[in-house]
Amino acid sequence: MGKLRQAALILGEGPTEFFYFKSLCDVFKRLTIKPDYPKHTNIKELDAKIAEGVAMGYSNIFCVIDMDTKDVEPERSQYQKLKAKYAKSINKPKKGIYCEVEFFETHRCTELFFLYYFRYTSRPYDTQESLLKDLNQCVEYKKAIDFFTKSKGLHAYFERNGGSLEKAIVNADRSMDEVQKGGRDYTFSELGRLMERLTTLSE
């Protein structure tokens, strides 16, 4: 298909990210956002999806990573190797390929960014269930494809129920500031930074 301009491939690890980023297509109108996810949530499958995106000519591939599954071996080492593999831009002028692969992490999982639509928290979550419980105090949410479909776009659904993407970005950036200052290595999201990248690309 040749070099795609103003197109970003977003790779999540499952349907949650797929449905969420699909719902952002209306926000970043001048940017083609193509969400996708591997059939099996492992590093090997994710690597294959990245390679596929590079071959298709995407200039930007953004990987949305849940860190709760990267806390233990062998996933931790496999993930670090994957990041190292794509640390440099892929530049193959003869094939018309130039691609930057970037990783955006959330601990425990993407639902923390959804909670940030409503309020800030830095509390540790031992399980996804405890995080989902806090999210459900702000808005009804189920981690299920039926729910994602019925919500008619997760982003719009959160905003209709009093949430705000701007607030989520501010809260996510705050979580990263605290991590960088050495306060903690949990309950953080780099998705605010991803939104800023998407905004730049769509300008």
Image (cartoon, grey):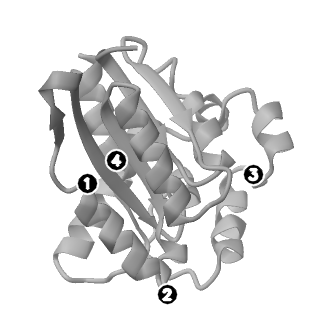
Q: CA distance from mark 2 to mark 4?
A: 25 Å
Helix, strand or loop under label 3: loop
Query: Which residue matches tag 4?
Result: 192
Tell me if label 2 and label 3 are in contact, CB under 8 Å.
Answer: no
**Most extreme residue toward the front, as rendered?**
94
Establish if 58 lies above or below 61: above
Query: Which residue matches tag 1?
Result: 86
Q: Residue at x 47, y 83 (%)?
A: 71
User: Which numbered disc flags the more N-terminal residue, 2 or 4?
Assistant: 2
Tell me if label 1 and label 4 are in contact, CB under 8 Å.
Answer: no
Q: Residue at x 72, y 69 (%)?
A: 133
User: Which numbered disc flags the more N-terminal residue, 4 or 3?
Assistant: 3
User: Which numbered disc flags the more N-terminal residue, 1 or 4?
Assistant: 1
Helix, strand or loop under label 2: loop
Nearest to viewer (mark 1 / mark 2)? 1
Q: Quadrant of the N terminus?
A: top left
Query: Which residue matches tag 2?
Result: 72
User: Which numbered disc flags the more N-terminal residue, 2 or 3?
Assistant: 2
Label of residue 141 in the image: 3
Helix, strand or loop under label 4: helix
Residue 112 lies, in percent from the top left, at: 53, 61
Q: CA distance from mark 1 to mark 2?
A: 21 Å
Nearest to viewer (mark 2 / mark 3)? 2
Mark 2 closeness class: few <14, some 14–19, many ≥20 residues within 10 Å: few
